[in-house]
Image (cartoon, rainbow, N blue to C red):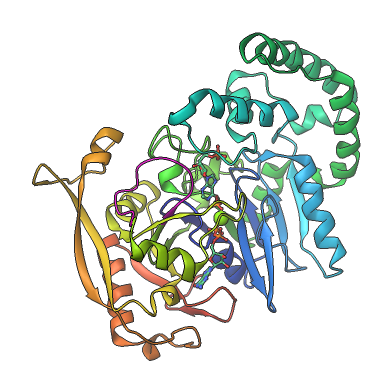
Amino acid sequence: MSTIVVVGTQWGDEGKGKIVDFLASQADVVARFQGGSNAGHTVTNEGREYKLHLLPSGILYSGCTCVIGNDVVLDPKLLLDEIDSMKALNRPMGTLRISNRCHVVMPYHKRLDALQEQFRGSSKVGTTGHGIGPCYADAADRIGIRVVSWMDKEAFATELKAALAYKNKLLTNVFGAEPFDFLEIFDEYCGYAERLRPYVCDTSSLMNKLIDEDKRILFEGAQAAMLDLSHGTYPFVTSSHPTAGAACIGLGIGPKCIQKVVGVVKAYATRVGEGPFPTEQLNENGVKLREIAHEYGATTGRPRRTGWLDMSVVRYAAQINGLDCIAITRLDILDTFPEIKICTGYRLNGEALHEFPASLKVLGQVEPVYETLPGWMCDTSAIREYSKLPANCRAYAERIAELAGTRLGIVSVGPSREQTIVLEKMF
Ligand code: GDP
Ligand code: IMO
Ligand code: MG
């Protein structure tokens, strides 16, 4: 067995797609285990950029089996658009498999996502608007529609009617919005079902078989620790568990099937959407980071909030994921900063905090403790060996690993596969 979970350690967009695509050259399988089309994973190959939302980041390898696990919420239209745009490129693709237990994102989930955000007003979450929260809520509420029912016209009609009876009441009576028409959704979604049917299977059986066959498997996390429903900055979180433990439930495999956990750490911090962000830099440093790094959301195009790397956050991510090592991405973005700050911990009323605050009120009041490290002021993007990186750059990377209490596994100095320096054997 040879398995690695790759997870985000901050607020998402750390470069998980790039790291998964890089590692996938040695893998047989890449499996997504949570989230949905809210994810935007960028993979750069042969100068071309691919923005993946539902397709796992192994899809560019023809020999790779790409699995969409049971706890991914599936937007069929967006998935079909992604498949079509891949096919239009006429390049070999991995083999796609979709769990028959995924919940399906319906048009009313997206409408409700928007209406709930509107209702929250100034306390909105800043969701991606992809219907993710309402779809997971329906799963928990036991009125969701799973792929297995959706593929069976009779069961789909019954379940959609039951769901609409409730949702249309909610839409009209609570929100004063237009109801949905049963036949319109039914016809549209039956069309999608026929096109996606060939990919659908029991992915838990498949994953267990692949594990038994000793295949090399990557579990690809979406979002990140701070957006975890249980462990993140609730309520400014997503509605799934973007942490390593969720790979088991989200794919129907046992906990002993996880061998290694890699946390992706962006060399600075970003956040899209609302919620606390203690190291946010609402100044020229923040603007410089956003412009150099082109920090705009891959899914919504929103400008990302930017700040210095927060090791309280990364250390907490190491704790809740059991990280073995980290992959530091976007080090090259810091090439022109004469000084780089790193937050080593928080203080509250002058006292050091030893645990990551559960309370948003507290998180809003903490004072980040910064350490200032000298920059390296040279272009690192063409460097391919760790020892050739400037000493100050290595010192920064090593300080991050030290503060996280993990090994330094990978350093990334650009978006493409070649711009990756490996310090630890991964498979
Ligand atoms: P993900 O959601 O974690 O997969 O990350 P995103 O794709 O949303 O955002 C990461 C961005 O950083 C993408 O545009 C990547 O192409 C880019 N990227 C990844 N690693 C590096 C790196 O080391 N240097 C630079 N300059 N860009 C990188
Ligand atoms: P990747 O996989 C960054 C954020 C949204 C919002 C909150 C809830 O590309 O790292 P949701 O639509 O999930 O209900 O929104 O979570 N969010 C992300 N932020 N990267 C992502 O994915 C995100 N997916 C959701 O901005 O604050
Ligand atoms: Mg992203």
Residue found at the very far left of the displayed protein: 350
Q: Is residue 122 left or right of residue 19?
A: left
395 to 368, vertically: above or below: below
Query: Residue at 51% of width from left, 54% of height from top?
Result: 303
Total marks in image: 0
18 to 394, vertically: above or below: above
Position of the N terminus, as image quadrant, is bottom right
Front residue of this view, candidates 395 and 153? 395
Query: Residue at 48% of width from left, 77% of height from top?
Result: 413
Front residue of this view, candidates 340 and 139? 340
196 to 26, vertically: above or below: above
* Rendered location of residue 177, percent (x, y): 69, 17
* Rendered location of residue 215, percent (x, y): 64, 62
* Rendered location of residue 59, percent (x, y): 72, 62
Q: Is residue 78 left or right of residue 323?
A: right
Residues in magenta? Answer: 270-281
**Magenta stretch, overall SS:** loop
Query: Residue at 55% of width from left, 27% of height from top?
Result: 118
